[in-house]
Amino acid sequence: MQQTNQRVLTMDHGYNFRDLGGYQTNDGQTVKWQRVIRTGTLAYLSQHDQQALVDYGIKFDVDFRSDVEVAQAPDQIPNDILYRHLPVFPDDKTDASKSQAELSAELKTRKMNGFDHMVRVYQNMVTQPQAQAAYRAFFAALLTNTNEKDGLLFHCTAGKDRTGMGATFFLSALGVPKKIIKQDYLLTNDILASLVQNRLIKAKNEGITGTTLDTIKAQMTVSSGYFDAAMKVINDNYGTMPQFLKDALQLSSEDVNDLKKLYLTD
């Protein structure tokens, strides 16, 4: 990891590490660097990686994974980073933590394909009470990160779905335009391209084809379709994103102002 206002951060044993700094808001302010980081799993971090987190200023670790995911692959972080477990779902609806064999077995019993399944997952991230409670607590953690030299990291397993929506809500609250937020969301596909390709090649070599292969790809990537499905539910149920943040995530006007003071620079 480097401290040079860099979007994508490199780790020895982690992936999809990204600083949310540098994005411009509608009113011309900029998100501060080294304050909020989105990532994939922290379960395999080396000692060098863990020190890199400390050197980068990370003081808070928010984990959106389910109880089972955490038990199977606990975060490897230094003791002085404060850990918060805020499960968005009771189990891994995104299937990011499942092995190929587990996924193949599940697909045989599932009624919908991978794309449609992920659309449902994104709709649930907006509407389910547990998901809303997790994102409310996420904002509470963001609001307690008041030292400007401290950073907050949040993640799930792949760092793309539950984390992607967390980033969407955070950047929306700061007033970053939806177009930029969506670009940040879709950036995952560029970063994970080689990982996805390797998994698909492995699946093909094991004789997996057709719908199952499409589903593996659908669940390893992000899609405009997933993002748009979540935005449609927000618009249908709440009218606007600011109204969703206020009503569902209980962010007051004062909270939004405090977030802007903490995370934006002129």
Image (spheres, helix red, strand yellow):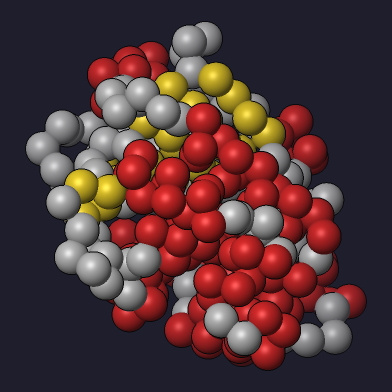
Q: In which quarter of the image is residue 93?
A: bottom right
| Left or right: where 224 falls relative to 262 | right
Q: Relative to residue 189, is residue 30 depicted above or below?
A: above
Closer to the camera in the image, 262 or 20: 262
Which quarter of the image is occupied by the N terminus?
Answer: top left
Name the residue rendered at 41%, 28% in the picture: 146
Q: Quadrant of residue 215?
A: bottom right
Q: Quadrant of residue 115?
A: bottom right
Q: Relative to residue 10, is residue 100 depicted above or below?
A: below
Name the residue rendered at 33%, 67% in the picture: 176
Q: Is residue 215 visible in the rendered structure shown here?
A: no
Q: Is residue 236 visible in the rendered structure shown here?
A: yes
Q: Position of residue 95 (x, y in %)?
A: 68, 60
Counting the numbered discs, the total is: 0
Q: Where is residue 243 in the image (x, y as percent from the top left)?
A: 60, 73
Name the residue rendered at 63%, 30% in the picture: 84
Q: Position of residue 186 (x, y in %)?
A: 37, 72
